[in-house]
Amino acid sequence: MMRSVFGAARFGAFSRNLSTKSPKVYQFEDIKALVRKPDLHKVLVDVREPSELQQYKMPTAINLPLKSAPGALSLSPEDFQDVFDLQKPSTDRELVFFCAAGVRAKAAEELAQSYGYENTGIYPGSINDWLARGGDKIKPET
């Protein structure tokens, strides 16, 4: 049943007006700071597929796979909780998107804006850049 919700949501998004607000661009040091010391107003969103997380899962990030769940942010808070087992980010939080190399992150960011998330960011280097710079050794402060 959720698959049809995702499909309908994906096509419905393209009929909405897309925001013209440009996303903030994040670099390695910015993401490193967010992983070390999470900001309650920002959410790191990994849009890779669950199978890709087997390679590496960034600490503190949530996974909203673009290909298999493009309408995730269109779901009601209750449905979002049921599907992803976490609270749906509110539209006043900044969503910072990343993937493997940055292409899906940009698509996910545009889709998020169509669902009312106006405060968005992109880490264009994404996981490839993160791992190349030793990000896998970065842990959240406790």
Image (cartoon, rainbow, N blue to C red):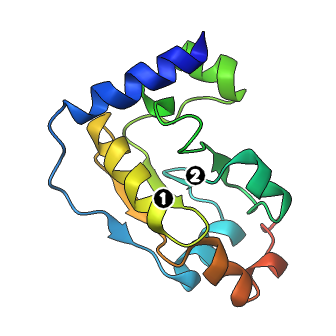
Q: Does dot 2 land on a helix, a strand or a loop?
A: loop
Task: Please tell me which residue is depicted at 46% across the width and 51% down the height of the picture.
Answer: 95
> The disc labelled 1 sits on which kind of residue?
Arg
Labelled pair 2, 1 in contact (Cβ < 8 Å): yes
Residue nearest the viewer, comparing 90 with 8: 8
Relative image position of residue 73 (x, y in whole percent): 46, 32
Q: Secondary structure under badge 1?
A: helix
Q: Which mark is residue 47?
A: 2
Left or right of 58: which side holds 119?
Answer: left
In the shown orientation, is residue 67 left or right of residue 91?
right
Marks counted in the figure total: 2
Regarding residue 76, the answer to whether it shows in the image is no
- In front here: 19 or 13? 13
Residue at 64% across, 60% down: 38
In the rendered image, residue 67, in percent from the top left (x then y), is placed at 55, 43
* Quarter of the image that includes the N terminus: top right
Residue underneath mark 1: 104
